[in-house]
């Protein structure tokens, strides 16, 4: 998977969830019975499909699941919006593509434009400025050109300096 691409068009379910010998491919560890070939249950199949669709970049599934979490309320300002945006917390440009739902947040159009303008401003692109991301989104950041600079435990944020 390419963390610097929004959509993983060549990704296949079998690559993420290879068929295991007599064990459910979703990772639950349940033994397969009878005619089952990959999934132990419909719930396993559905959970695997949603994970696959999110990593592949299926915006319909991402928006559906994100709406179930945030119900259309902006995580930045708290306002409800019918025009909400499914925002990558760690932008694709910085390695936030092909990430789980943890790397998405609901933002109203105003907050999304404000965040985008800030992220791509000349000030943020200079090496002396810090990028701030939630700690829950750091699993895919190894080797992407950023180094941890400071951890602030009170706010559950990790600050990065670009190389």
Image (cartoon, rainbow, N blue to C red):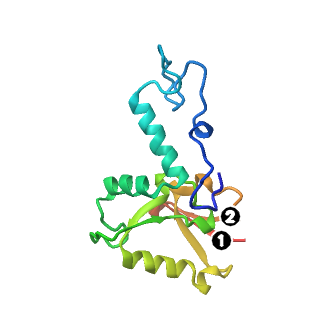
Compared with residue 125, is residue 67 higher up or lower down, i.e. above or below?
Answer: above
Compared with residue 156, is residue 17 higher up or lower down, i.e. above or below?
Answer: above
Q: Residue furthest top?
A: 34
Question: Which of the 4 image quadrants contains residue 66?
Answer: bottom left
- Residue drawn at 48 percent across, 38 percent down: 48
Dot 2: what SS? strand
The image quadrant where one finds the C terminus is bottom right
Q: Residues within 10 Å of mark 2 (few under 14, many from 20)?
A: some
Q: Which residue is mark 2?
A: 147
Give the percent coordinates (x, y) of residue 5.
Answer: 62, 61
Give the percent coordinates (x, y) of residue 79.
Answer: 28, 72
The answer to whether mark 2 and mark 1 are in CB contact below 8 A is yes
Give the percent coordinates (x, y) of residue 56.
Answer: 55, 51
Give the percent coordinates (x, y) of residue 87.
Answer: 45, 66
Question: Which of the 4 image quadrants contains residue 122?
Answer: bottom right
Question: Which of the 4 image quadrants contains residue 19?
Answer: top right
Q: Residue furthest bottom?
A: 122
Q: Nearer the viewer, residue 15 or 121?
A: 15
Q: Nearer the viewer, residue 139 or 108?
A: 108
Q: Residue furthest left?
A: 80
- Residue drawn at 37 percent across, 79 percent down: 110
- Residue drawn at 57 percent across, 58 percent down: 7
The circle drawn on residue 106 is none
Q: Nearer the viewer, residue 57 or 68?
A: 57
Mark pair 2, 1: CA separation: 6 Å
The circle drawn on residue 161 is 1
Dot 1: what SS? strand
- Residue drawn at 49 percent across, 28 percent down: 28
Q: Earlier in the sequence, mark 2 or mark 1?
A: 2
């Amino acid at each position: 998977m390419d963390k610097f691409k929004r959509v993983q068009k060549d990704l296949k379910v079998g690559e993420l969830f290879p068929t295991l010998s007599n064990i459910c491919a979703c990772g639950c560890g349940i033994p397969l019975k009878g005619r089952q070939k990959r999934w132990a249950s419909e719930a396993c199949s559905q959970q695997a499909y949603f994970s696959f669709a999110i990593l592949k970049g299926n915006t319909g599934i991402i928006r559906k699941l994100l709406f179930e979490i945030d119900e259309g309320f902006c995580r930045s300002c708290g306002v409800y919006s019918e025009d909400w945006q499914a925002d990558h917390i760690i932008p694709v440009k910085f390695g936030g593509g092909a990430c789980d739902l943890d790397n998405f947040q609901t933002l109203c159009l105003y907050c999304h434009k404000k965040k985008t303008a800030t992220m791509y401003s000349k000030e943020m692109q200079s090496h002396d400025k810090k990028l701030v991301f939630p700690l829950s989104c750091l699993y895919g950041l190894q080797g992407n050109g950023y180094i941890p600079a400071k951890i602030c435990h009170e706010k559950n944020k990790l600050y990065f300096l670009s190389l």
